[in-house]
Image (spheres, rainbow, N blue to C red):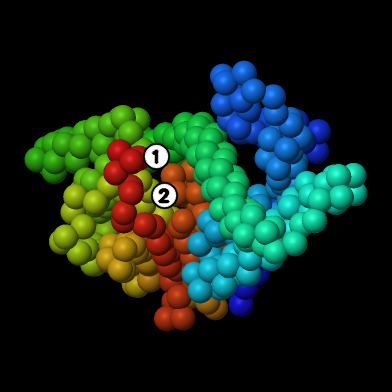
Amino acid sequence: MLRLRHHRFPFSPITVILVALGAGLLFGAQGVIPFLMMGRRFDAYAVLGPTVTAFLLWAPIAPLAYNAAHLALDQSQTRGARILLLGMFSVVIAAVHGTASFWLFAARYLLFDQVNLSAAAIVPFQVRLVQSWLELWVLTGLFAALVLWRRGKQQELDLLQRERNLAEARLKALRLQLPPHFMLNALNAAAGEMDDDPERAADMLAQLGSFLRTILRADRGPTHALEREIDHLRTYLEIVRMRRGVAFEVRWHIDDDLADMPTPTLILQPLVENAVKYGLDADPHRALIEIEAKRDGERVRLAVRDGGASEETPRPATSTGIGLQHTRERLAALYGEDFAMEAGPRPEGGFAVCLSIPIAAKESFS
């Protein structure tokens, strides 16, 4: 179904009239120059009148042409509907403009000079109609160029705003990505193993060092390879496993062809932290965490699921608080509205967070 939208004309009436008058005089002057060069007398009204009249009549039509330009560029409308409507619009407007400009100019001769405009005037009138039709499309094309330029400028402003939002989101990310209690507990656990199991303590410190390197590297850019994101999560979960001394199952569902795909840096970290906090702690007997990265056409689906609290024992409200809110803000800063995020309890128990982001054009964020 065709939906017509009105777009506010960006110029004042006086501006449009002055531009139309100037353009009419400029183009009409082409007919004056030969007379001036030959030193011959000429009727200024006869030479300039048709052009100036035609251009001035475009002034009240300009807002319609501006909206026609928007319609021509509106990709949400079907091509057939746009062609049909624009074709009808151009024929009607050209007929009105051509008729008005011809007879307004001819009125002076009919009223004052008593010139008989009969069959001899049919050809010029038809030519005037064709000229009006061509001029309308030139005017619409100019407005279309203006619309595209304004959209480009707006996109630049949106990009700058998005970069500012991204910088703010990155600062928030660093606060969330380095939880002091997690680091302190991991170090204490490693220290406690120094005497009993030095090899295990050294392994834990090595994992912790790898974890910290990824955290510190996160400030270099908003994205990194999905493979690096997954490696970071493996390190994090291994630290959790070693620190708690609890065996829990982690299932990885990762498409191999997505390894190099640019992914928002540490975007899954707060989701996995939630899965550990509310899933692993809620029910050790159902200790299961699933991490997924699957291609879905031109998009990728990222998901973190846990087998923790069931619907009968829902997780605390804070699980949908700052961590998920921060993740949503980061995705909005990177992708605008071109992302989806769903979070909620699973029918079989536990909780799931699913993200959908575009694959194409993410290199621009690297």
Classify mark 2: residues with Cα within 10 Å, few (<14), some (14-19) or many (20+): some
What residue is shown at x 45% (from left), y 57% (from top)? Answer: 339
Q: Circle 1 sits on which residue?
A: 177
Q: Residue furthest right?
A: 111
Q: Which structural element holds mark 2?
A: helix
| Residue drawn at point x = 81 percent, y = 33 percent | 14
* Residue 51 or residue 212, whichever sits in front: 51
Question: Do the numbered discs 2 and 1 sit on residues whose CB atoms are within 8 Å?
Answer: yes
Residue 74, x across and y down, in percent: 55, 59
Compared to residue 348, the image places residue 315 above or below, namely above
Looking at the rendered structure, the kind of residue marked 2 is Pro
Residue for point 64% across, 55% down: 124
* Residue 201 spot, x, y in % from top left: 16, 39
**Figure quadrant of residue 146:** top right
For the point 22% across and 63% down, the residue is: 254
Q: Is residue 68 visible?
A: no
Q: Nearer the viewer, residue 335 or 20?
A: 20
User: Does residue 104 appear to the left or right of 172 in the view shown?
Assistant: right
Q: Point out which mark residue 79 bears.
A: none
Furthest toward the left, the residue is 199
Vertical side of 244 occupied by 210: above or below? above
Q: What number is the disc on residue 270?
A: 2
Quarter in which the N terminus is drawn: bottom right
At label 1, which amino acid type do we have? Gln
User: What's the distance in space between the residues labelled 2 and 1, CA to CA?
Assistant: 7 Å
Residue closer to the observer: 49 or 76: 49
Q: Position of residue 263 (x, y in %)?
A: 31, 48
On the picture, is 160 further left or further right than 225? right
